[in-house]
Image (cartoon, helix red, strand yellow):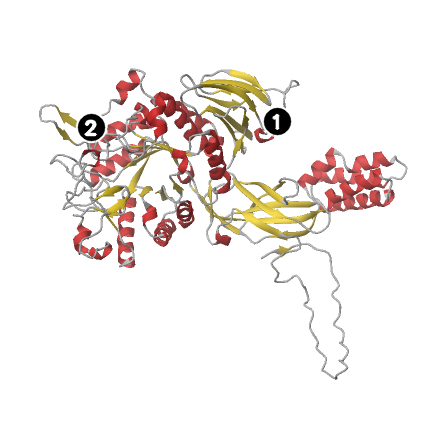
């Protein structure tokens, strides 16, 4: 498991004869191994609890091109010598591309942490190295002993020998010169002891040692997998709309609707792109069942003109490999995808593995469903909700046949330009199936992304991430208080980031939280800020920008839910009247695109606020130099009042180390630019704030460098 790459020579004692027992028993000779460390779980320097490692390395941890991946380990040794710990990153071809010194964690924890940054997509790996830091050990011991006037000349001589050897070993002329000068001074008995020690521990020597550490007993852990995927797997802003509503028309005389289609839905794309979204997500576009079709507000009786729920898939017009006739045909869909792509939008398609009672599979393959004792097929239930218009699939009767058919369907839509699938209720299917399906697809097309719509138990959500889902809906939707948000932001950015990428959707056709129902426009703005700034993935469902907040009595769903009827919204009119959140959403997405720190998951730090309803967090990123741009740092601080009903004020106390400031002014201040209002202020460790939820509930601050 561990490899020691540098260690002192050891003498192995020879095997000696064992004196015969007095009772005359024969002697027993036991061979001593050539190296007693071979095959042991602990190396010379023990390395344990390496992260991110999933199931001992059975599954790869998740990474995104150019995003920092937090790595950590517990590393220690016997005695008091100083340790160094390094993380090493290996490219898909096995070459070493990065090594970074890890920082020590809380005193006494023996924990070490840092970050690695894979540059492109592929199957990467990483390892942790623990080693004895010869220079730091000598410098510490020399300082202590010389101050106590113990072994003074011995300690100075050891330092001179150490740095003389370092000068010989390095190929850097500048570092060699520094080491030689220090060694010569340490060995010069004619100089003052303190001056000799100061030369051996100078800032120049320490800086050179950072670049060229003096390592001994180097022990490397085994390598662990890291799957690095394209941007869309871990970054992006999603917008959901129903194509049938875009261009739908209502006849006032007949009170009948005519459906929109892919050709009319194209007209909505420019506005979505203008708001800065990256993905347009479509609910199922397949034929909708007529048997047990649901009416308005999930009623059990549908009129002849009611369109039904798109998630009740399948009719005489076809199943998952067909398009609803009112939406158009494959040529229309292809044109829609092409138009979206021209506007830098990707199309995400719903993969809902369930069927209406009149889906063709119900006749051709009844074994793919659950048959009850009375001979009927069981419909879907999520108590207290009942879905009489949907038959769930059963993967236990014919797993090979059903799996092969679903694979065919996914490949079909990929052939029509779909590279992202939002998967409906994946937690109601076996996890093995997703591991197989996503693994099979990604082996053919690593660019295909799957989002899990899984509002379910933590263990299942974690398993789906391990099985291959690139991202998932999350509990963010129901985390509203400062305490809840702090706990959840830490969890998703640090504790679960190796296997779970959260997409912070603020609403869905099924979810309208009490916070939004009763919080007014301020609640909608607050949740949008939290989602867009808190996660590199966020999304909203159409109508959010219009503050749609009226729920069906007794539920968390919008009244007159679009799942069961057409909607004809006047988005442009609302903007013109100043009654739309769209301009603010546009600003949020513009800020995201301008600041790379907001597009990483694992770089979030919490800060203190004296107010119980004001949350403070920052995101920080080092941006490497390019051919035309120098290296730089990007830091965003978010101070947000999460109480939509009040004005809050108090003091923010910043963790300046987390902000990685290059240097403070003599008065301890630095400049922040407020990205919502355009104001600029001098801030310091402690800062007063006043945030009125009805005016501007948050500060989004960029630290000026």
Does any portion of residue 630 appear in the rendered image?
Answer: no
Label 2 Cα neighbours within 10 Å, binned few <14 / some 14-19 / many ≥20:
many
The residue wearing badge 1 is 662
Q: Which of these two is toward me, 300 or 223?
A: 300
Q: What SS does tag 2 mark?
A: loop
Image location of residue 634, percent across then percent down: 52, 28
Question: Which residue is rendered at x = 64% and y = 52% of the image?
Answer: 46
Relative to 631, 503 lies left or right: left
Relative to 265, 106 lies left or right: right
Q: What SS does tag 1 mark?
A: loop
Question: Which residue is rendered at x = 29% and y = 40% of the image?
Answer: 349
Locate the C terminus and report the quarter of the image it occupies.
Answer: top right
Label 1 Cα neighbours within 10 Å, binned few <14 / some 14-19 / many ≥20:
few
Image location of residue 324, percent across then percent down: 18, 40
Residue 581 appears in which quarter of the rendering?
A: top left
- Relative vertical location of residue 619 with respect to residue 227 in this rendering, above or below: above
Question: Which residue is rendered at x = 24% and y = 38% of the image?
Answer: 334
Kindly indicate whether the residue at mark 2 contacts the one at mark 1 (C-beta within 8 angstroms).
no
Per the model, the C-alpha gap separating discs 1 and 2 is 54 Å
Pick whichever of labels 1 and 2 is earlier in the sequence.
2
Q: Which of these two is toward me, 644 or 634?
A: 644
Which numbered dot is residue 181? none
Residue most toward the right?
190
Number of marks drawn: 2
Locate the N terminus and report the quarter of the image it occupies.
Answer: bottom right
Relative to 613, 322 lies left or right: left
The residue wearing badge 2 is 247
Question: Which residue is rendered at x = 16% and y = 27% of the image?
Answer: 249
Does any portion of residue 404 appear in the rendered image?
Answer: yes
């Amino acid at each position: 498991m561990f490899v020691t790459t540098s260690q002192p020579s050891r003498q192995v004692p020879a095997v000696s004869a064992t004196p015969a027992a007095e009772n005359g028993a024969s002697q027993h000779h036991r061979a001593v191994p050539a190296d007693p460390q071979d095959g042991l779980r602990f190396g010379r320097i023990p390395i344990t609890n390496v992260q991110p490692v999933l199931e001992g390395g059975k599954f790869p941890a998740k990474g995104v091109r150019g995003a920092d991946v937090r790595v950590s380990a517990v590393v220690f040794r016997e005695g008091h010598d100083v340790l160094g710990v390094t993380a090493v990153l290996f490219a898909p071809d096995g070459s070493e591309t990065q090594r970074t010194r890890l920082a020590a964690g809380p005193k006494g924890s023996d924990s070490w942490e840092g970050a690695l940054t894979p540059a492109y997509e592929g199957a990467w790996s990483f390892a942790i190295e623990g080693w004895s830091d010869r220079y730091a050990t000598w410098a510490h011991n020399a300082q202590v002993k010389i101050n106590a006037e113990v072994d003074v000349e011995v300690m100075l001589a050891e330092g001179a020998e150490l740095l003389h050897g370092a000068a010989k070993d390095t190929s850097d002329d500048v570092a060699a010169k520094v080491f030689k000068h220090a060694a010569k001074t340490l060995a010069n008995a004619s100089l003052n002891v303190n001056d000799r020690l100061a030369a051996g521990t100078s800032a120049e020597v320490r800086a050179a040692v950072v670049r060229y550490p003096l390592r001994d007993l180097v022990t490397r852990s085994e390598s662990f997998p890291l799957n690095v995927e394209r941007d869309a797997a871990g970054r992006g802003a999603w917008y959901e709309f129903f194509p049938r509503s875009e261009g739908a028309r209502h006849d006032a005389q007949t009170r009948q609707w005519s459906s929109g289609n892919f050709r009319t839905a194209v007209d909505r794309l420019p506005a979505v792109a203008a708001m800065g979204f990256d993905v347009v997500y479509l609910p199922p576009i397949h034929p909708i069942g007529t048997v047990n079709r649901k009416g308005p507000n999930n009623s059990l009786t549908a009129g002849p003109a009611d369109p039904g729920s798109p998630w009740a898939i399948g009719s005489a017009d076809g199943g998952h490999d067909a398009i609803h006739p009112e939406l158009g045909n494959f040529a229309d869909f292809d044109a829609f995808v092409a138009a979206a792509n021209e506007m830098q939008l990707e199309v995400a398609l719903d993969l809902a593995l369930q069927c209406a009672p009149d889906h063709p599979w119900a006749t051709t393959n009844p074994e793919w469903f659950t048959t009850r004792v009375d001979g009927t097929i069981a419909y879907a239930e999520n108590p207290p909700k009942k879905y009489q218009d949907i038959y769930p699939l059963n993967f236990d009767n014919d797993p090979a046949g059903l799996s092969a058919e679903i694979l065919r369907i996914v490949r079909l839509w990929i052939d029509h330009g779909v590279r992202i699938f939002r998967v409906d209720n994946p937690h109601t299917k076996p996890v093995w199936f997703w591991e197989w399906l996503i693994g099979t697809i990604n082996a053919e097309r690593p660019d295909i992304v799957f989002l899990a719509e899984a509002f379910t138990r933590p263990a299942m959500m974690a398993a789906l991430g391990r099985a291959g889902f690139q991202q998932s809906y999350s509990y963010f939707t129901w985390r509203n208080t400062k305490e809840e948000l702090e706990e959840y932001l830490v969890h998703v950015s640090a504790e679960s980031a190796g296997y779970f990428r959260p997409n912070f959707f603020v609403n869905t056709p099924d979810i309208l939280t009490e916070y939004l129902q009763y919080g007014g426009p301020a609640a909608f703005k607050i949740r949008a800020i939290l989602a867009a700034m808190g996660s590199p993935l966020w999304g909203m469902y159409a109508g959010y920008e219009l503050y749609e907040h009226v729920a069906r009595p007794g539920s968390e769903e919008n009244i007159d839910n679009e799942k069961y009827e057409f909607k004809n919204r006047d988005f442009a009119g609302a903007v013109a009247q100043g009654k739309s959140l769209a301009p603010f959403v546009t600003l949020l997405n513009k800020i995201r695109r301008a600041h790379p720190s907001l597009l990483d998951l694992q770089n979030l730090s919490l800060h203190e606020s004296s107010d119980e309803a004001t949350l403070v967090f920052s995101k920080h990123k080092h941006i490497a130099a390019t051919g035309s741009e120098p290296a730089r740092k990007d830091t965003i601080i978010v101070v947000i009042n999460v109480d939509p009903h009040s004005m809050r004020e108090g003091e923010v106390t910043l963790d300046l180390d987390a902000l990685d400031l290059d240097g403070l002014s003599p008065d301890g201040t630095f400049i922040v630019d407020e990205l919502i209002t355009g104001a600029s202020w001098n801030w310091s460790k402690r800062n007063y704030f006043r945030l009125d939820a009805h005016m501007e509930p948050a500060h989004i601050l960029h630290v000026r460098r």
